[in-house]
Amino acid sequence: MIARVSLEIALRKEFDYLIPAELTGQIDVGSRVQVPFGARKILGVVTAVAEESGRANLKPILKVIGAQTLVTPKVLKLARWIGEYYCCAPEIALKSVLPEAVRKEDAGWRERLFVRALSVSGEFPKLPKRQQEVWNLVEERRELPLAELLTLTKTTAATVRKLEDRGLVSITSEVSERDPYARETILATQPILVNPAQTTALEKIKGAMDGKDEGRRMNDEKAATKTTDSGSASSFILHNSTFLLHGVTGSGKTEIYLQAIAHALEQGKGAIVLVPEIALTPQTVERFKARFSSEKLQTLVAVLHSHLSAGERHDEWHKIRQGRARIVIGARSAIFAPVEPLGLIIVDEEHEQTYKQEEAPRYHARDVAIMRGQMENAVVVLGSATPSMESFYNCKRGKFTLLELPDRVDDQKMPYVRVVDMRQAAEKGPPLFSPQLKEAIHQRLERGEQTILFLNRRGYSTSLLCPKCGYVAQCPNCSVSLTYHRTEQKLSCHICGHNEKVPSVCPEPKCKNPAIRFAGTGTQKVEEVLAKLFPKARIKRMDADTMKRKDDYRRVLGDFRAGKIDILVGTQMIAKGLHFPNVTLVGIIYADSALHQPDFRAGERTFQLLTQVAGRAGRGDVEGEVFVQAFTPFHPAIQYARRHDFNGFYEQEIEFREQLKYPPVSRVALLTLKGRNEEKVKFSADHLKRELEKKLKGLKDLIIAGPAPAPLLRAENFYRYQIMLRTRAMSALSRELSQIIQSLKLPEDVSLAVDIDPVSLS
Ligand code: ADP
Ligand code: ZN
């Protein structure tokens, strides 16, 4: 027998190997194997097994990794699609479907040695004192870990081995599973009686799940009886699967997810729940664990995210593969979890950018979810308070089914949003707090209520400049200005991490002006000014600078929940998914800062961000209030967010996208050329453009724009030029691009990255 293997090196080619006699029966499609390649040993995945190969002199497979096949045929198929659609080598796509800890098996299962007392037949031997003491303890406990025994009896393993030699005890190695949530006590919860809007949504989702189930059964029967009629089974398959659940924060979306998952379990199927990494708080995980930790459908909930240790990730993944955990909750890559059979995929906060992987394979987990749902006949539910333009457009065109939850549960009102025009306040120098916001914070402190203040820039000042000669402190490696960090007294680059000392005079040799000044505001400054305004308030800052250790995030949120903090200042980190009933005020320091990004999605992002941040206010009994400070108060993104009007925002935004043929009206492929020599990069970009024009003539609606310098021209000493392609038929374009890239000749020090459906243009 031979096996075809896809190696972990991007050769875009598979190789045949012999299955040696001693490994027969252990190798199947999806097995991870180690094979010889030249002088090296390389890991790979078996993609096919056959009787014989067209090639001679095959080398044998060296070893198999894992007792089970690691890549299920269904996930293998998904990986192939990713390779094709996202224009990357199939090996790279395949590599990304297994967590590193599973691929390498370095972490493996944690094994521990256990000592067990055996039953003694005949006369009990006379033991030396040490051995007798050890035996006494083992006999009393019957069984205990070796390590514990050694500590308790203050002896060495050699003594225990002697007991083993006498046939008194056995020492065996056993797997002890790591559970990242072992320290939590989780109280079981019951399904909530859902309200009418939730009922309608849930019925539709369950109906689709039943339809899929029926369709699959009919397909199975058809396959079994081999009838040739094109019966109605296929119409079930074609039935649109994907739902978009549009509901404001607090409208009860999660409750719908929980009950839909319960339905999948009733059907004997599993579910995958994707949430953005940042929303994977213990709070979120606990809600899912709590619902499924008891009752008749009881199942393990596996959790996959980047804060787990390699060992924990290994164990969580295998719990899924073994079918012991049928519900997976995780970040982006959890979409590849080997749940089988899969009944339901949920993508919460589907508009989040973090679902896009920013390195090859540059897949979008939401889109992969939709594809996987189609391939495996599973229902997909996308949820958001601020759906992406893409998903809402798909609803309008009938590709997705829209489900709406317009109100908060228990009739809580949406917070009242006030937009503060900062242009007037700015006359006396750039202000941080308008009188209105200051007064509102003051009131909250008096009443013992909590406040969240949001600004999407960390550091103290966002630039250092000389008003005399116009000098701006720039990163030597990137085309961005340096941010001043006051506590550390340094200027630092947020792209490459470069740090330097703060100059005392303008560094321009001809200038040397001592009156250089800082401009722009970051969270550090907000915190400092706030402390001066409200000396008694307990203030905490939450951004990448203060949240360095694994537990910081959890600790600060715990303190906030416990009422030990009055005002929480932070970046994106505090914008999402947090639920604090005592927060009645949210202040957005500068709402426009996200608007002026060179990206066609700047308006959409701003709308989403404002809506998400505002959603943090008034989640308890007291109505919430939001202050949005802005220099362009009448911008549609700000005005529609103020009125909580998603539909209004969508209608005006889609018009702009239509005009310029931007997504979701078309799809984008972004080609970025990168190298240390700007001239070479530019030259290569021109060359590529000519190739594209020549070879893509056949594609009708294609628009080729560029080459142009990337918005961030220079990053970490690399110059970057971009070409943007827009088309409605992306699959066709991807296929062509793969060909072009493979035959393209670039200078050695210039590289090309292809990003299909990019979420960021920088
Ligand atoms: P979302 O996911 O849309 O933010 P959640 O599902 O988290 O909303 O619901 C918000 C809160 O309301 C939760 O505490 C949840 O348990 C509760 N809840 C959900 N549905 C109902 C309902 N029908 N009746 C009462 N409370 C509900
Ligand atoms: Zn830099």
Image: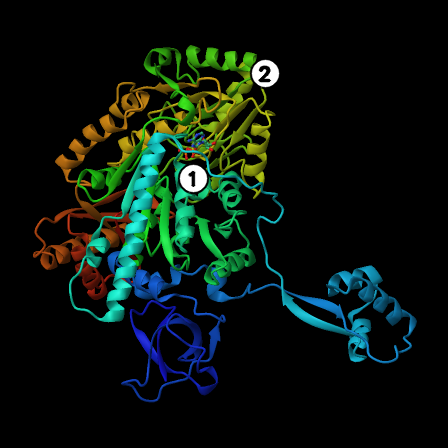
Name the residue beneath numbered marker 2: 535
714 relative to 172, above or below: above
Neighbourhood count class around disc 2 (C-alpha, 10 Å): few under 14, some 14–19, many 20 upward: few
Ligand 1, seen in the image, is in the quarter at: top left
Name the residue beneath numbered marker 1: 494
The amino acid sitting under disc 1 is His
Kindly report the distance in space between the C-alpha atoms of the residues bearing marks 2 and 1: 30 Å
On the picture, is 431 further left or further right than 226?
A: right
Residue 281 showing in the rendered view: no
Residue 133 or residue 200, whichever sits in front: 200
70 relative to 737, above or below: below
Does the residue at mark 2 contact the one at mark 1 (Cβ under 8 Å)? Answer: no
Residue 475 showing in the rendered view: yes
- Give residue 379's position: percent from left, percent from top: 31, 49
Q: Secondary structure at mark 2?
A: loop
On the picture, is 500 further left or further right than 351?
A: right
On the picture, is 583 further left or further right than 686?
A: right
Asked whether mark 1 and ligand 2 are closer than 8 Å, the reply comes as yes
Q: How is the image coloured?
A: rainbow
Residue 525 or residue 419, whichever sits in front: 419
Query: Which tag, 2 or 1, sits closer to the chain's start?
Result: 1
Q: Secondary structure at mark 1?
A: loop
Neighbourhood count class around disc 1 (C-alpha, 10 Å): few under 14, some 14–19, many 20 upward: some
- Residue 601 sits in quarter: top left
Q: Name the residue at 49% across, 70% down.
A: 66
- Give residue 578's position: percent from left, percent from top: 47, 32
Q: How many marks?
A: 2
